[in-house]
Image (cartoon, helix red, strand yellow):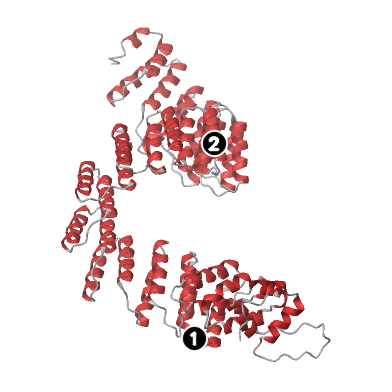
């Protein structure tokens, strides 16, 4: 018997409410205690309250609702699954345990739509109130208790882990099902395959696919498309085409996804001829290409530098009634910006707007980067203002690009101002941001601020890389603080950041500028001990250091070592040696080096001639520099 809606539940006090539920219970409750003792609540009576939506009453008796009672009530609701989720949501967490949740999920799994069951499963998984194994065992137990033959709730558990990107947990559930001799549905297998494919865990994809084959789970079109995509990622285009033949033999016709996957795979590998043939085959089968098809081909063509052919494809899209997307235009804009053709890049953006296609953050980022490369930083600033005006929010790439542009231009004030805008917009600076700022602060002799910024970056949990350390070391060396630069070299070792030839060349250059060539030589040896090969800059730095001190014997010794290693002398090599020879009053030897330069096709510059003038005191040498011989 059910409680009628006419009962004014809200006006009853608690003892009377309990009397009502006792009266309508399917069992006769005997009260042997004092008249004031509260009668027991049964699962059947509570079920009737749920079905008749007596939520106010349920709210009042919440303290009495134990997980055991809730579990009993849910079991009694198995014939009315539509009320289960609302009931669960009204309860306190204290009234629920994992068994309650699993019974509810099992009942909800019987609904035509999986939405409610999956929603509740996600809630349970995210709450971490139970381990993955406890949830699995709870669902198994609920099936037995409710006498449900379907195993769909276990399939849902695997799919929920897939949707939450919990790949290892999803795989464990998959194997638990197999262990319990429960055959996962093909949709569950596809969810796993898709997840691992998207995460590029290719071996896991093949492991699951192998299990499907062993268990006799038949692939469907979705399965084949996923596996074809995996083969394309691996670059195994031949096997991918074999899979297409196999699916056709099983009666599955390739669809748009199949062709798009294959075309994109061929374009990624630079096989534009194969991609074009697939486009023809696609059209022959009556499968119409879409924007993704053309975007893959356009991207492939632009990578090969075939911009005009890409433009022809865009026209073909138009003729086919396929409107180019932002991705299409962004691809072309990227090509034009890389070629320095900003006029066509901006023309492409204008064409987007005329067609009603909204430029994206990527569109603006490409154009801003193009302007920065051309040194047109103020125009890049204006473009970000336009971006905001159009309702397109700048992202971390936008800010980093602008900060880098202002830093390269030496405008520390503007670079820091853009950083402040970035922070006010709720976007956290990245390693790229900090590196650009450290670079410009070094150029402006503000290394105290650069060090503070470096410390703040580490406090935020952002670890420095080689480029950051090189920027800091360069800044300190340029500002004469070689001690701090050497300390940073030790910090690199402590933080497991391996230096490169740029790191050592910067330090060696500073030591040589200070006349400490022996210290620079020690760094050269240390550099070799790291397995870092010195380059021509390393040797030129030492030659310059010895020449500046007038130690020409050592300078020529390093020059000979350099030649013995296969490095050809450069203009810097000759200038350093000529300067040293002139400084030590060896003008004739300097003139001989000048002739050697000419014989090797190296054109002297003004520094060469100025050194010679100082060394031999003949201005005619400089005036007749067109013919050094």
Indicate which disc residue 421 carries.
2
540 or 478, nearer to the observer: 478
Marks 2 and 1 in Cβ contact (< 8 Å): no
Query: In the displayed structure, would residue 110 be above or below residue 534?
Result: below
For the point 27% across and 24% down, the residue is: 599
Compared across the picture, whether 134 is left or right of 565 comes to right
158 or 433, nearer to the observer: 158
| Cα distance in 3D space between marks 2 and 1 | 59 Å
Quarter of the picture containing the N terminus is bottom right
Q: Position of residue 581 (x, y in %)?
A: 43, 19
206 or 605, nearer to the observer: 206
Residue 510 visible at all? no
Q: Position of residue 293 (x, y in %)?
A: 26, 55
SS under mark 1: loop
SS under mark 2: helix
Disc with the residue nearer the chain's start (2 vs 1): 1
């Amino acid at each position: 018997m059910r409680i009628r809606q006419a009962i004014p539940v809200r006006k009853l006090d608690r003892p009377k409410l309990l009397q009502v539920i006792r009266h309508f219970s399917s069992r006769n409750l005997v009260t042997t205690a004092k008249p004031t003792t509260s009668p027991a609540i049964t699962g059947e009576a509570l079920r009737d309250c749920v079905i008749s939506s007596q939520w106010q009453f349920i709210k009042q008796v919440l303290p009495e609702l134990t997980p055991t009672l809730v579990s009993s009530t849910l079991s009694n609701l198995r014939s009315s699954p539509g009320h289960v989720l609302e009931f669960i949501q009204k309860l306190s967490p204290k009234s629920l345990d994992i068994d309650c949740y699993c019974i509810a999920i099992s009942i909800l799994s019987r609904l035509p739509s999986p939405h409610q069951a999956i929603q509740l499963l996600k809630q349970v998984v995210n709450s971490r109130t139970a381990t993955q194994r406890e949830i699995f065992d709870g669902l198994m137990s609920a099936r037995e208790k409710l006498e449900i033959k379907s195993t769909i709730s276990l399939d849902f558990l695997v799919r929920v882990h897939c949707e939450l990107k919990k790949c290892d947990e999803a795989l464990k559930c998959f194997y638990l099902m197999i262990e319990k001799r429960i055959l996962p549905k093909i949709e569950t297998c596809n969810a796993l395959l898709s997840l691992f494919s998207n995460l590029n865990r290719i071996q896991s994809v093949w492991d699951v696919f192998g299990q499907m084959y062993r268990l006799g789970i038949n692939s469907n079109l979705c399965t084949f498309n996923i596996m074809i995509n995996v083969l394309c990622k691996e670059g195994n285009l031949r096997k991918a085409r074999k899979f297409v033949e196999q699916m056709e033999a099983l009666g599955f016709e390739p669809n748009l996804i199949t062709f798009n996957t294959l075309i994109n795979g061929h374009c990624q590998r630079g096989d534009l001829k194969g991609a074009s043939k697939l486009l023809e085959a696609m059209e022959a089968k009556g499968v119409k290409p879409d924007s993704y098809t053309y975007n893959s081909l356009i991207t492939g063509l632009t990578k090969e530098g075939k911009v005009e052919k890409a433009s022809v494809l865009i026209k073909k899209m138009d003729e086919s009634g396929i409107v180019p997307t932002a991705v299409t235009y962004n691809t072309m804009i990227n090509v034009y910006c890389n070629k320095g053709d900003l006029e066509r890049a901006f023309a492409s953006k204008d064409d987007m707007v005329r067609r009603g296609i909204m430029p994206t953050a990527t569109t603006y980022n490409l154009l801003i980067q193009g302007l920065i490369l051309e040194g047109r930083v103020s125009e890049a600033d204006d473009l970000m203002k336009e971006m905001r005006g159009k309702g397109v929010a700048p992202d971390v790439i936008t800010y980093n690009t602008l900060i880098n542009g202002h830093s390269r231009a030496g405008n520390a004030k503007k670079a820091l101002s853009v950083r402040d805008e970035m922070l006010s917009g709720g976007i956290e600076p990245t390693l790229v941001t900090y590196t650009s700022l450290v670079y410009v602060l070094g150029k402006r002799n503000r290394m105290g601020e650069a060090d503070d910024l470096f410390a703040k970056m580490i406090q935020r949990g952002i670890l420095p890389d080689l480029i950051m350390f090189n920027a800091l070391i360069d800044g300190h060396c340029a500002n004469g603080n070689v001690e701090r630069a050497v300390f940073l070299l030790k910090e690199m070792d402590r933080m497991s950041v391996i230096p490169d030839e740029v790191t050592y060349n910067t330090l060696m250059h500073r030591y040589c500028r200070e006349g400490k060539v022996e210290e620079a030589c020690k760094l050269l040896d240390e550099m070799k001990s790291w397995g870092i090969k010195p380059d021509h800059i390393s040797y030129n730095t030492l030659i310059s250091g010895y020449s500046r001190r007038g130690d020409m014997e050592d300078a020529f010794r390093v020059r000979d070592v350099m030649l013995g290693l296969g490095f050809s002398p450069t203009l810097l090599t000759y200038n350093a040696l000529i300067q040293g020879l002139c400084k030590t009053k060896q003008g004739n030897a300097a003139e001989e080096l000048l002739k050697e330069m000419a014989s090797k096709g190296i054109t002297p510059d003004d520094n060469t001639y100025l050194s010679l003038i100082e060394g031999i005191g003949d201005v005619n040498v400089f005036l007749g520099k067109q013919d050094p011989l």
